[in-house]
Image: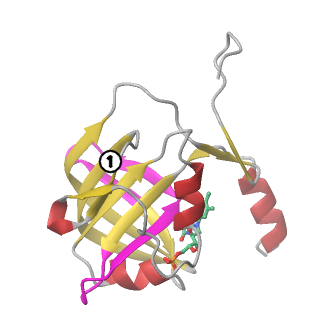
Amino acid sequence: MPISRNEFRYALSRFASGVTVVTTKDTGGRLHGITVSAFCSVSLVPPLILVCIEKNTGSHRALAESTAFVVNLLGSNQQYLSERFASRLPDKFEGVSYRRGIEDLPILENTLANLECVLKYSYEAGDHTIFVGQVEKSHASADGEPLVYFHGNYTEIKNSNGNS
Ligand SMILES: Cc1cc2nc3c(=O)[nH]c(=O)nc-3n(C[C@H](O)[C@H](O)[C@H](O)COP(=O)(O)O)c2cc1C
């Protein structure tokens, strides 16, 4: 018998993750963006990554009908972007700086890195879908600290010398 939802969530909250914003657009051309911590690398050759998206989100519908998406890796000073793209605001992109990339999708400015992907595979997995993207283009900044999510809170990586 599987463990309870609360027990599962509590155990997973002890796993520290980075925070990303995945952007895409639907067939009507409307932009979508969603805060995602369920992101990981999959394959080096070819370069593949995955994101897990809950089925009842607006972004899921958009991703399911899309052919491309962008993963934006947030820096420690971008908690406001994580909160904005985890919200139900009608226009999450209002006031957000971005440029256009693959298939005219938004690439958020000043992130630690971004990955422009074509959608290669998708797999149903419970109440989520695993979307696997092949990275066609990337940009990464040489410095900057990551935004970290741990135990239900945002945090930063602390250096051993005590500086954050
Ligand atoms: C730190 C953080 C991490 C999240 N990670 C995920 C995730 O990995 N997958 C997911 O489907 N939702 C995740 N969410 C929840 C979505 O961001 C949230 O449901 C969002 O409102 C969906 O927006 P949409 O309906 O416009 O697509 C996360 C939220 C936060 C705050």
- Answer above or below: position of 124 versus 71: below
Q: Is residue 31 magenta?
A: yes
Give me the residue at 66% from left, 17% from top: 163
User: Would residue 93 be seen by someone viewing this image from the given angle?
Assistant: yes
Split into quadrants, the picture shows ligand 1 in the one at bottom right
Asked whether, in this view, residue 81 is left or right of residue 4, the answer is left
Question: Is 32 a magenta residue?
Answer: yes
The residue carrying mark 1 is 114
Q: Is residue 37 visible?
A: no
Instruction: Write the start and end of the magenta stretch as one range.
Output: 25-50
Q: Give residue 82's position: percent from left, percent from top.
A: 55, 57
Total marks placed? 1
Residue 150: x %, y % from top left: 71, 46
| The residue positioned farthest toward the bottom in the image shown | 28
Residue at the image point whose x is 71% and y is 14% from the top: 162
- Is 130 in front, or is 18? 18
Instruction: Say what amino acid the circle numbered 1 marks.
Output: Asn
Q: Residue furthest front?
A: 95
The residue lying toward the viewer, choosing from 46 and 93, is: 93
Q: Is residue 9 left or right of residue 60?
A: right
* Image quadrant in which you'd find residue 69: bottom left
103 with respect to 107 (left or right): left
| Position of the N terminus by quadrant | bottom right
